[in-house]
Image (cartoon, rainbow, N blue to C red):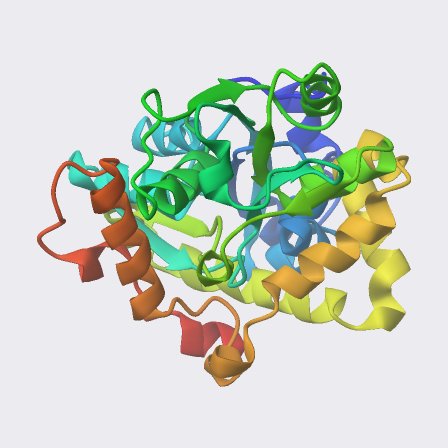
Amino acid sequence: MTTRNNLTRRSFGQLALGGMAVSALGAPAIVRAQTAITFAVPNPSALTWLPYWVAVGEGYFEEEGFTPTLEAIDGSSAVLQAMTAGQAQIGAPGPGPTLGARARGVDVKFIYNLYPKSVFGLMVKEESLYQAPADLKDTVIGIGTADGAEVSFTNAIMADIDMKPDQDFTYLPVGDGGTAAVAFLRDEVAAYSGAVSDVAILAARGLNLREITPSEYLGFFGNGIAMLESQIASTPELPLAFGRSLVRGIKFASDPANKETCLAHCAAGNPQEAEQDYASALFDGVVERMTPTDKYIDEGYGFQPPEHWQAIHDSAVDSGALAEPLADLSAVYTNEFVPDWNA
């Protein structure tokens, strides 16, 4: 498993937890007996996984009896592979790759909608003449990774205008942050499909982007928390404890008075990111996109609108990402834990 930004997966995952592990040596047995779990995510940005690092820093996981280690690996497919190989008990894949895994017989289930508002966007340089996705015919679109959730997101947009990858346009994996900026500056790509974090990073480096995402796709939710059904069955307390901790984390982060404390918690997870001038703006963007829309605010954090899953599923079928419709889409996700998390 690998990480980006020159962070080793071991050092990244242990940065915020090393102090906890050391202090536990002299702690009562009840603390030392906590259950160790691995949480796999598709990139090493601590701010992207804000509630997790806040929950670590505020001790929420510890109160629930779990000691988590975050492993940053490369893309949603790698996250799903780590889960099926037993290397991670819980992960944060995108909905598109989750649908694909389910179609292949993987018993993965989405349990928490981490980004109820779209974390992705299709963007061009501010001064570009491209005004809509249709203008990108016969161009190259930059993506972070070849199997990331941004690919299924873009495929869905392009399928609506009868454009297919490798036929009407081409994808080019260019990474994120600085490498994506270089691709733009060298005119290697005409557009970029990326996340809110990518926009903040590129803007901080003097590259202003303009979004051309159709409005109907801005409601497509992004990465969330998933587990294997077999894992849920063997550790039924884990989804409850993990979700409760995340909800407490995002609620804490949503109070403006706690912003500096939360930034410090994220700095423990990724010191390099914390030193960047985009960190504060990215924090604000993440909190906004993790806040449920007005329509579903009463459902609570983590809720997954069935009609959004249906739209993502149908777009995946239309684009060819799914060879055929799933027999039972409701098996891919569950809202059963949401009331407990938000109680």
Q: Is residue 185 left or right of residue 232?
A: right
Up the image or down, 343 lies above or below 268; here it is below
- Give the answer, above or below, for where 277 lies relative to 29: above
Residue 28 visible, this orientation: no
- Looking at the image, which is closer to me, 44 or 280? 280
Q: Position of residue 200 (x, y in %)?
A: 77, 43
At which x and y percent is residue 218?
Answer: 51, 59
Q: Position of residue 161 (x, y in %)?
A: 34, 45
* Residue at image point 21% right, 44% down: 317
As drawn, 283 above or below 14: below
Q: Is residue 254 above or below residue 102?
A: below
Name the outermost residue toward the front: 129
Image coordinates of residue 95 in percent, x first then y, are 37, 48
- Residue at (60, 27) in percent of width and height: 190
Report the side of 326 relative to 290 (left or right): left
Query: Which residue is depicted at the point 48% across and 48% down?
Result: 223
Q: Quadrant of residue 324?
A: top left
224 left or right, relative to 185: left
Q: Nearer the viewer, residue 35 or 57?
A: 57
Residue 131: tell me if it is visible. yes
